[in-house]
Image (spheres, helix red, strand yellow):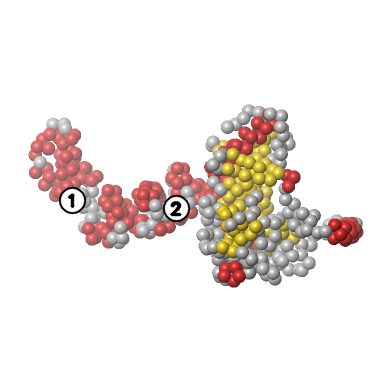
Amino acid sequence: MTNPNWEVVIGLETHAQLSTQSKIFSGAPTAFGAEPNSQASLVDLALPGVLPVLNRGAVERAIRFGLSVGATVNRRSIFARKNYFYPDLPKGYQISQYEIPVVSGGGITIEVGGVEKYVRLTRAHLEEDAGKSLHEDFHGMSGIDLNRAGTPLLEIVSEPDMRSSAEAVAYAKKLHELVQWIGICDGNMQEGSFRCDANVSVRRRGTETFGTRCEIKNLNSFRFLEQAIEYEVERQIELIEGGGRVVQETRLFDPDRVETRTMRSKEDAQDYRYFPDPDLLPLVIDDAWIARVGSEMPALPEVQRSRLVEVHGLSVQDAQALTASRATVDYFEAMLAALPGEAKLCANWLMGELSARLNREQIDLARAPIDAPQLAALLRRITDGTLSGKMAKDVFDAMWNGDGTADAVIAARGLAQISDAGAIAAIVDEVIAANPKSVEEFRAGKDKAFNALVGQVMKASKGKANPQQVTDLLRARLG
Amino acid sequence: MAKLARIRISDDEASRTLAQLNDIFAMIEQMRAVDTEGIEPMNHPLGGSQRLRDDVVTEHDRREAAMRNAPEHQDGLFLVPRVIE
């Protein structure tokens, strides 16, 4: 959708709900879906005389984010009041950060169409969420649920570095992956845990200055983000080409009609009258704290990917699939720890048999009935020749259904593969003696007859003979 | 300014308030005359830094009590004059 005459400029503001147990300034729980107002404490209700006390867990998550994007974690940052009136904001102001945020700078590398691009971040700041207004009819009134009031958010602001909806989506997806990876946000977009505002403007190619921008609020899916930007770009270009002029304003995206429309124009743009919140002292983060958080951080996805390729010899595709989530790569690492040197086998089983089964039964990897050491123990019986691949799948099924460990299943069902050359030779000889016709045909040049003989041996061994050894021995005998 | 703060004031109050505001602006002008070059802005009159609390749930459901304080409520929701933005 690139237009030869126009360049698109996009910056994103993303609200990531931090995965703390309690709220940012109160000890009320943050669980989603509770009964209305059952998680609104005195602080969240803004009753007179209450004071906010900052949640260490929220700050720690902000530090984690700062470190993961190569940003500066400010040793001292300030909370400010953002003043506006709305019934779901009982204090009449939102506690946020304004002049000095907790995180400054940093950036994220995205890839679109095989081309890498670095998107700079302006800042990330801590703030509280507002409550929820319900406008269904309560005999002509609005209902207010303050459960969400005071939920910790990290607002992540990018520079206007993106030049297409595809880049904006790639950035949002990368950020979405990252916040989940480092364990600061559950990433649940349906529940509003991760939502984007897009600042969109257009300018004629070759122009230095930015065009007038519009902000599209509250995009809670990647598809809506893409659709909203594409619609907005078209709208602005048509407007300007038709002799009009873009007015700076806040717009809402209507997913049903796939269009954006004015929410409020600049004339009634809010004057938030920010000022430092006297209820909160400066947030001071010392070097030791940052160092400790850094030492506890998981390796980032791209670091993990290159390690899987370079150290474990996996393909880029395998590495990509294994790093789809932290849970997946953690599972893989745990398998590999129990079965060193068998990265490819572990990867194949994790992404093949196990993933297929999890998908089919709609189960999360974290709740898989077979854990990583158990699966590795099964694979060990392939590498040591006890089981063929086919037999291993049967054992896997049994393990899945709760029949115990791989070795327990093998013992209980007498499944161990026969790899003893003497035992196989005895069966081979029996089969040759019992099937003179097939032997005759094979000697006459019929390959099919050979397969029939292999089949007979496997049958005689109840499927337990090592197929490779059977083939080799038969050829030697019939030679 | 009254609109911004959502308060209703009479003309009489408005003129009195205007005089007071002008006094405040005069004071601000006086403060602005001071050379603050090289002085770090003070973000809080008290020294020290923000105390932090551990991320633990310590508050439990107080809805019934909160609802008793509300002029109108229904189904656990506070009711307010209809707002549509």
At x 31% / y 60%, what residue is drawn? Answer: A402
Q: Quickly name the residue at label 2.
A: A328
Tell me if residue A435 can be seen: yes
Q: Secondary structure at mark 1?
A: loop
Q: Do dots 2 and 1 share one subunit?
A: yes
Q: Nearer the viewer, residue B69 or B47?
A: B69
Q: Is residue B64 left or right of residue A450?
A: right
| Viewer-nearest of discs 2 and 1 | 2
Say which chain tag 1 marks. Answer: A
Q: Residue A462: which numbered mark, if any? A: 1
Q: Is residue A180 left or right of residue A51?
A: left
Q: Amino acid at mark 1?
A: Lys
Tell me if residue A425 can be seen: no
Q: Position of residue A247 (x, y in %)?
A: 71, 39
Q: Amino acid at mark 2?
A: Thr
Going from N to C along the chain, the mark reached first, 2 or 1, is 2
Q: Quadrant of the N terminus of chain A?
A: top right
At x 55% / y 59%, what residue is drawn? Answer: A19
Q: Nearer the viewer, residue A16 or A237?
A: A237
Alpha carbon separation for disc pair 2 and 1: 36 Å
Q: Is residue B69 left or right of residue A409?
A: right
Q: Nearer the viewer, residue A470 or A158?
A: A158
